[in-house]
Amino acid sequence: MPLDVVDLRAFYASPLGHVARRFIGRAMLRFWPDCARQRLLGLGFSTPYLSVLGMRAERTIAFMPAAQGVVNWPSPGFSASALVEPTLLPLPTASIDRAVLVHALEETESPDDLLEEVSRVLNPGGRMILVVPNRRGLWARMDGTPFGQGRPFSRRQLSALLRAAEFSPEHWAEVLYVPPLQRRLLMRSASVWERVGLGLSLPFAGVHVIDATKQFYRRAPLRATRRSFAFRPVLLPQPAPTPRAANPPEAP
């Protein structure tokens, strides 16, 4: 069942949602400390992070999937959010400098098509931050948060998806080591959980945060091209049958 925008907004208004936003946002800011004069796109439910990343951006747009629903963002001023089909974005090719995907990849039916579409709207050398639930983490195993919905991914699976979509990972972080429970003691000790998890390089973080760059040149499908030539049908002229002459009538 797809995530609902009302549930997403309620989660980020909760204490656990504030913890998730704080640690994921810190990782994003380490990757992108400044987005000045950049055209920034958020896909999924990325508005809690766009509010921080897009402060100095030239333009910031928030696209939300049709199955999820949309909310007005930002609250003051003109709205910069829209309801879209994630694999058919209403943007020209190479029109975006940076993209942020949160609660997007794990919810789509076709992750390959989604990344291909993001690659299309990014300009050559454009950058993307991808936030995805970790398959080995506690957050993906408990459905009390949005990160427990949809399809979680391992590091190897994400690497293969990015490589197929012509993205090159530049930085990789794993965050949210604190258990996803609404307990006051856990909320207060969240920073300790993060320090211990990062210091020991534990593999059980809740979320992958990847900074990837779109490659300038795409590989030419040589093998597919050769196959197309090898199996191309060839039309050869065929001899036409000669009509048989009619038998002459017998003499009386």
Image: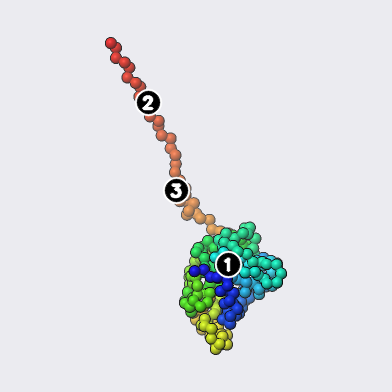
Residue that numbered label 2 is attached to: 243
Structural crowding at the residue carrying mark 3, measured as other residues with C-alpha within 10 Å and reported as few (<14), some (14–19) or many (≥20): few
Say which element carries label 2. Answer: loop
| Horizontal and vertical percent position of residue 191 | 57, 85
Say which element carries label 1. Answer: loop
| Horizontal and vertical percent position of residue 91 | 63, 59
| Horizontal and vertical percent position of residue 61 | 65, 66
The one nearer the camera, 155 or 92, is 92
For badge 2, the amino acid type reads Pro
Structural crowding at the residue carrying mark 2, measured as other residues with C-alpha within 10 Å and reported as few (<14), some (14–19) or many (≥20): few
For badge 3, the amino acid type reads Ala
* Quadrant in the picture for the C terminus: top left
Q: CA distance from mark 3 to mark 1?
A: 48 Å
Residue that numbered label 3 is attached to: 230
Q: CA distance from mark 2 to mark 3?
A: 37 Å
Residue found at the far bottom of this picture:
185
Say which element carries label 3. Answer: helix
Residue 167 in sight in this render: no
Residue found at the far right of this picture:
77
Residue that numbered label 1 is attached to: 69
Mark with earlier residue (3, 1):
1
Quarter of the rendering containing residue 29: bottom right
- Asked if the residues shown at circle 1 and circle 2 are in contact, with their CB atoms under 8 angstroms apart, the answer is no
Task: Return the mark for residue 77.
Answer: none
Q: Say which of marks 1 and 2 sits in front.
A: 1
Q: Residue at x 44, y 43 (%)?
A: 233
Mark with earlier residue (1, 2):
1
